[in-house]
Amino acid sequence: MNSLPDSESVLEVGKANFETEVIRSQQPVLVVFWAPWSGACRAFASVLNEVKSAAAPSVKLVRINADHNPELSLWYGIQSLPTLVCFVEGVVRARIVGTTSKKTILAELESATRNHGALPKLTFP
């Protein structure tokens, strides 16, 4: 396997479309920096799919292959994969390094977007 499962439903972003899809996005964007060789990234895919379902349509989830986009990885200080970066109105509002739970990610998203009004009150099972 060389990509995240369910990859057809997650937009792949790179240098060419980063500004349009992330910086200028009208909605908050959760960017996942990943690499196809990373076992942690592959194992984390199911959690990200759950996050995408829980946060949609309020938050857009996109992914960036760190190997194919070293400039973006360097610019945002990516030193470990996976790394999640939440952008609100083009500004970094939260960062999660490594794998974690759906609950933790949604709590970070809620905190990061609180003043933006993007997410409804999230409840956890």
Image: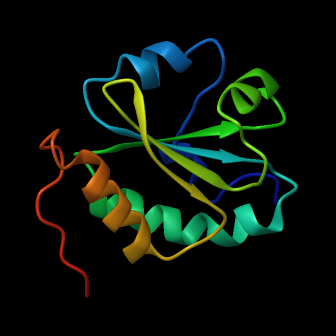
Residue at image coords 49%, 14% = 19
Q: How is the image coloured?
A: rainbow
Relative image position of residue 67 (x, y in whole percent): 84, 36
Q: Quadrant of the C terminus?
A: bottom left
Image-quadrant location for residue 45: bottom right
Q: Is residue 62 left or right of residue 73?
A: left
Relative image position of residue 118 (x, y in whole percent): 17, 44
Residue at image coords 69%, 56% = 82
The mark tally for this picture is 0
Image-quadrant location for residue 5: bottom right
Q: Nearer the viewer, residue 1 or 54?
A: 54
Q: Quadrant of the N terminus?
A: bottom right
Relative image position of residue 63 (x, y in whole percent): 59, 41
Relative image position of residue 23 (x, y in whole percent): 43, 20
Q: Is residue 79 left or right of residue 112?
A: right
| Above or below: residue 46 compared with residue 68 | below
Q: Residue furthest bottom?
A: 125
| Above or below: residue 37 compared with residue 118 | below
Residue at image coords 78%, 47% = 79
Q: Is residue 76 left or right of residue 36?
A: left
Image-quadrant location for residue 107: bottom left
Q: Nearer the viewer, residue 79 or 17?
A: 79
Residue at image coords 44%, 25% = 22
Q: Residue furthest right?
A: 37
| Above or below: residue 66 compared with residue 36 | above
